[in-house]
Image (cartoon, coloured by chain):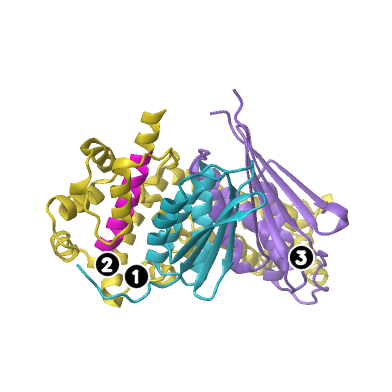
Chain colours: A cyan, B purple, C yellow
Amino acid sequence: MSCRAVGRLVAGGVACRLGFEVEQMEDLQLAIEAVLSRQAAQRILMLELCRSESGLEVRVGPFAPADDETRLRHLLCTLVGDADVQDSGDGEWIVLNATKQRALVPTSS
Amino acid sequence: MKMDDTQIRLTFPAKPDYLLLARLALAGLARSVPLDPELLADMKLAVTEACGNAVRHAYGGGEGPVSVVFVAGDDRLEMIVEDRGSGLDPSAILEWDVEKRVNGGMGMTIIRELVDKVDVAPGADGRGTVVRMTKYLAPS
Amino acid sequence: MTRVMDRNINALLVAYHRDGDAEAREHLLVDLMPLVRALASRYAGRGEPLEDLVQVGALGLIKAVDRFDVDRGVEFSSYAVPTIVGEIRRHFRDKAWAMHVPRRLKELSVRLSRVLDELTTELGRSPTVQELAEATGVEEEEVIDALDSAHAYSTRSLHAPFDDEGEDSLFDKLGAEEPGYADVEDGSLVRAGLDALDARERRIVELRFFEEMTQSQIAAELGISQMHVSRLLRRALVTMRGKIDQVMGDENG
């Protein structure tokens, strides 16, 4: 599906302009890939990218409600800092908050 | 069976930093609409010229959106670049300045070399400009 | 062109074509070189050196100056631009540029991967896209495109009806730092997941979960940084997850 590739690459372009680290950009792209694979609620799906304090806020929707909410949020949170599913009049929207730098975490093997 | 056209609308601030988004969108489209590399490169150039014009002229140094609609069909690729600005030309240039001249006027000439059909019209309700570019694709 | 300059160019063209003024021709070729450079620069970024494109464009300029018909009342630029651009585009066709693109992309991907790893080690963090672009001498846009094309993003939807059983343990472990695939009940699903990975990702997953090596040990084994291992592992797990979902979705109809 070409819209997934377009979503990934355009998000990559914005992330690059905002100074994202490569790893953070790629994690965001993976998250977008996962989100864009869901069933859209309407013929038109929207992907909005907004600069935020720590990076980028991404909103995708509207989606048909599905029962994968918890799992999806869990998956997305391993990739980006914060992910949420919000109900709106036209369906569910997924909101991702991606940070441009990896938070400092003690390394573990 | 005819495939539904894929339509993608990309909207971004009319600033030079964001021109790469239009080219990346094309690269994304090309992942599933097979485009010969030379054709893809030409389309990237054409969309850059059209968006570049909007970035330079549409909002007279102010802010505003540019949007590009890509329509990918079996037989053609369309790119429709829209801005909502007043499209004022820069004031008369008194000195030879190739960059301004080339960027301002050459864009359309270059676009005509790269696509099969170009159409420039005022935007809906008279505001802004719409540049519609069509490239016919050889049947695969 | 500005009105002042238009008069000059037109005057020079007339002097050359009507009066045979050779010096006028020289002036034209010199004065219009900035135009050639501006047009050539639009074609930069396709892997051909800019100076080559400028040389080729200059040939187009010469053609345009020599063949222009001053009596037709057509503006010179509307003749010159297509002629110059035409030469540049022909240059690409002659070099069979389109045929080399896949190989260039592969070479770029390999180089990006190597430099990414070097920078990660050197900086102690993942480099920014800008830093990677500078270090490889490649435009940021090309870096983004090449990085994306190097990954095996699925061509089918990751969405599938969820089954509660073996899924939960796999998914929950995916969310945790150190998933343990040895615990997953259905070996065939894991095999299907592994099949969706590229050779390097598969090796890393095997080393981590079947040979139970730590990320640092894997890093030493493969000669890459631990951060790189972490990143590759995370991507591999997400890809496997997607494949497993898909297989289960197919089975459920």
Residue C8 on image: x %, y %: 78, 69
- Quadrant that contains the N terminus of chain B: top right
Residue B91 on image: x %, y %: 83, 74
Q: Is residue C42 visible?
A: no
Where A11 sits versus B117, above or below? below
Whether C200 is among the magenta residues is no
At x 81% / y 59%, what residue is drawn? B128
Q: As rendered, which of B119 and B68 lies closer to the eye?
A: B68
Report in which chain the residue with disc 3 lies: B
In the drawing, what numbered circle is on residue C126?
1
Count neighbours of disc 1 (C-alpha within 10 A) and say few if under 14, some if 14 to 19, many if 20 or more. Answer: many
Q: What secondary structure is the stretch in magenta mostly built from?
A: helix
Residue beneath disc 2: C227
Q: Distance between the residues labelled 2 and 1?
A: 8 Å
Residue C185 on image: x %, y %: 22, 41
Count neighbours of disc 3 (C-alpha within 10 A) and say few if under 14, some if 14 to 19, many if 20 or more. Answer: many
CB under 8 Å between callouts 2 and 1? yes
SS of the residue at dot 3?
loop
Amino acid at circle 3: Ala
Q: As rendered, which of A92 and A55 lies closer to the eye?
A: A92
At x 62% / y 66%, what residue is drawn? C33
Question: Which residue in the rendered view is the most extreme toward the top?
Answer: B1
Q: What stretch is highlighted in magenta?
A: C227-245
Amino acid at circle 1: Ser
SS of the residue at dot 2?
helix
Amino acid at circle 2: Met
